[in-house]
Amino acid sequence: MPLFSFRMTDGNSVIIYAPDQSAAEETLTEMGMQSTAASVRELTRFVANFALTDSGDLHATLLDPGTLNEVSPDYPLLHSARAHSYADFGSSSTGESSEPVLFDDSTRHDLHNWSRRDKDLIAYVVKKERERLSN
């Protein structure tokens, strides 16, 4: 059975495992989401890590670059912001200082070194992604 990715108008995404798109849409309707689907695509790859928290909840994290590449087309503004050279944000501790490193998930751990401007840029783009399909 395939997986379907629904990009919701509020900026979130929902992944549903179903025999076909119609069944996936029915499952989405049954979930009673507060937002409506803006687009749907079939995924060819999906890997998630589910970590058990001390409070007994499961915290899901997408770590697989292939999975992130599957979902990223639904967020073109964020993808564009991340495509800027990391050199614009300062050097990365993971790369050669003489070479720019693209800001992507492999450099995400450098986030604690970012200035307020850098964090504000991503926050602004996230806000715009949430609003982009809401009208």
Image (tube, rainbow, N blue to C red):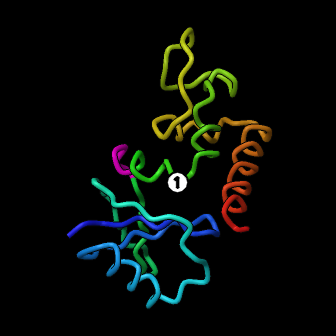
Q: Which residues are magenta?
A: 63-67
* Magenta run includes residue 64: yes
Residue 113 magenta:
no
44 left or right, relative to 95: left
x and y, in percent, of residue 107 in the image = 51, 34
User: Can you say whether 121 is above or below 62 in the image?
Assistant: above
Is label 1 in a helix, a strand or a loop?
helix
The x and y percentages for residue 130 are 68, 62
**Which residue: 53% across, 40% down?**
108
In the picture as drawn, the residue positioned furthest to the left comes out as 1
Q: Residue at x 45, y 36 (%)?
A: 106
Residue 76 to residue 93: above or below: below
> Image check: 33 left or right of 24?
right
Note whether 117 is above or below 22 in the view shown: above
Residue under label 1, please give it: 74
User: Residue 24, image x and y in percent?
Assistant: 35, 77
Furthest residue to the front? 22
Q: Quadrant of residue 2?
A: bottom left
Quadrant housing the C terminus: bottom right
Question: Is 43 displayed left or right of 7 in the figure?
Answer: left
Q: Quadrant of the N terminus?
A: bottom left
Residue 115 coordinates in the image, percent (x, y): 75, 36
